[in-house]
Amino acid sequence: MNTGWFLEGVDLDTLAEQSCLIAQPLRALLDIFCLRKMDYPGIRSLTYGMRIDEYELASIDKDDLERMHPVYQHKRLDTCISAMQRELKQ
């Protein structure tokens, strides 16, 4: 990950009087792709294989994805984000 972008898409919250960092859904999804070294499987695989609601995917804004580009240095994630942008635009 690029320096300075560690907290992009991450919220600071308080649970049981303790502070914690919680990834927003898009950040969590991209982190899963990064951790598991997955290529982008396509919208259909996300809705059926990972059981992500189509409505939630449709709510992802192009700007949300654009903000995630500098977070990751991996070519796989850059390709993944670009593919999501193309597919969600339709």
Image (tube, rainbow, N blue to C red):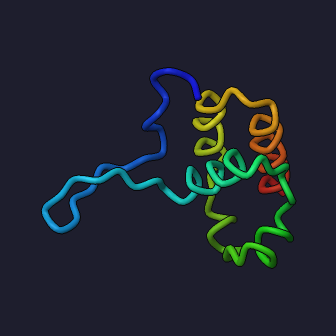
Give the side of residue 9 with respect to residue 83, left or right: left
Give the side of residue 21 with respect to residue 16, left or right: right
- Where is residue 40? Give x, y as percent: 83, 52
Front position in the image: 66 or 40 = 40
- Where is residue 68? Give x, y as percent: 61, 38
Q: Quadrant of the N terminus?
A: top right
- The residue positioned 77% from the left and 68% from the top of the image is 46
In the figure, residue 56 lies in which quadrant?
bottom right
- Where is residue 15? Give x, y as percent: 22, 65
Q: How many labels does the image show?
A: 0
Specify the farthest residue to the top. 3
Q: Quadrant of the C terminus?
A: bottom right
- The residue positioned 69% from the left and 65% from the top of the image is 58
Q: In this view, does 49 lie above or below 85?
A: below
In the figure, residue 50 lies in which quadrant?
bottom right
Front position in the image: 68 or 85 = 68
- Where is residue 7? Give x, y as percent: 43, 37
Give the side of residue 9 with respect to residue 80, left or right: left
- The residue positioned 66% from the left and 54% from the top of the image is 32
Front position in the image: 18 or 4 = 18
In the figure, residue 4 lies in which quadrant?
top left
Specify the farthest residue to the front. 36
Q: In this view, does 8 lie above or below 26?
A: above
- The residue positioned 77% from the left and 46% from the top of the image is 37
Give the side of residue 24 with respect to residue 52, left or right: left
Front position in the image: 53 or 41 = 41
